[in-house]
């Protein structure tokens, strides 16, 4: 079910229909043209970062990759931080769609937490979106860039999401009532970040065994 969810969920950077050309483009409304250009610019950002590195992701390069001008990148996002925040928002929306398709909300808390870890780890395998996100994160921390707040906000969203899953499990009895939901959520989130960063350092890393060990550890810690 989880594999199907990730396969079936459309990436926020890949519209479900191919880009229109000629007369088709002329029939799009202004709002549709704006949405399409934003998606194409975000997709271009992912390609430039994942293929050429963070330093190469200038507005000029992103606009050229997407087939637009630098001015349109500035118009759509305003700044590098605006671009990154839009990218992060799209990734969170994509993740939520995948969670919904996997019916995470219908599982008991412990099963849902295991499924979340499985789903999150699966996206580390061969997808430019996740690769570029963590490359940008690493550069932001290393170079003390202003975008750090955007990533901090993103990770807070994840922490709250995981904590909610744990608290739901505690309420229904599938997770120990005395477990520290907030600390465990932060621990799980940090572990997932570690898996993703290690996969960048060593692209040949087998994620499956590490993922399974994390799930086993969480189950041992949280099962009533």
Image: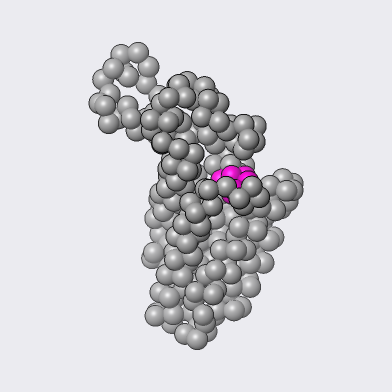
Q: Is residue 136 magenta?
A: yes
Query: In the drawing, does residue 24 fall left or right of residue 18?
Result: left
Q: Is residue 103 visible?
A: yes
Q: Quadrant of residue 57?
A: top right
Q: Is residue 4 magenta?
A: no
Query: In the drawing, does residue 144 fall left or right of residue 167?
Result: right
Q: How many marks?
A: 0
Please state which of residues 203 and 201 is positioned toward the viewer in this rendering: 201
User: Quick check: 211 above or below 63?
Assistant: below
In the rendering, at what x and y percent does residue 202 appear? 74, 48
What residue is rendered at 63% in x and 67% in y? Answer: 214
Please state which of residues 176 and 85 is positioned toward the viewer in this rendering: 85
Could you tell me what secondary structure mostly forms the magenta stretch? helix
What residue is rendered at 53% in x and 25% in y? Answer: 60
In the rendering, at what x and y percent does residue 113 appear? 50, 67
What residue is rendered at 39% in x and 80% in y? Answer: 171
User: Quick check: 102 above or below 68?
Assistant: below
Query: In the drawing, does residue 152 fall left or right of residue 21?
Result: right
Question: Which contiguous range is marked in magenta?
Answer: 133-140
């Amino acid at each position: 079910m989880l594999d199907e969810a990730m396969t079936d969920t459309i990436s926020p950077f890949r519209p479900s229909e191919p880009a229109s050309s000629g007369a088709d483009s002329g029939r799009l409304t202004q709002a549709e043209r704006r949405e399409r250009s934003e998606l194409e610019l975000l997709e271009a950002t992912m390609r430039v970062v994942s293929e050429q590195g963070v330093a190469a992701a200038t507005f000029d390069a992103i606009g050229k990759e997407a087939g637009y001008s630098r001015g349109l990148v500035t118009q759509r996002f305003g700044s590098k931080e605006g671009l990154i925040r839009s990218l992060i928002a799209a990734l969170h929306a994509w993740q939520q769609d995948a969670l919904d398709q996997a019916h995470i909300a219908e599982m008991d808390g412990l099963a849902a937490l295991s499924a979340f870890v499985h789903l999150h780890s699966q996206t580390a395998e061969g997808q430019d979106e996740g690769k570029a996100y963590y490359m940008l994160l690493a550069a932001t921390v290393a170079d003390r860039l202003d975008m750090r707040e955007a990533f901090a906000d993103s990770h807070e969203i994840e922490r709250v999401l995981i904590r909610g899953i744990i608290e739901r499990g505690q309420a229904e009895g599938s997770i120990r009532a005395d477990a520290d939901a907030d600390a465990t959520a932060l621990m799980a989130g940090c572990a997932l970040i570690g898996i993703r960063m290690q996969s960048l350092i060593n692209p040949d890393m087998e994620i499956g065994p590490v993922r399974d060990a994390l799930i086993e550890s969480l189950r041992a810690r949280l099962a009533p």
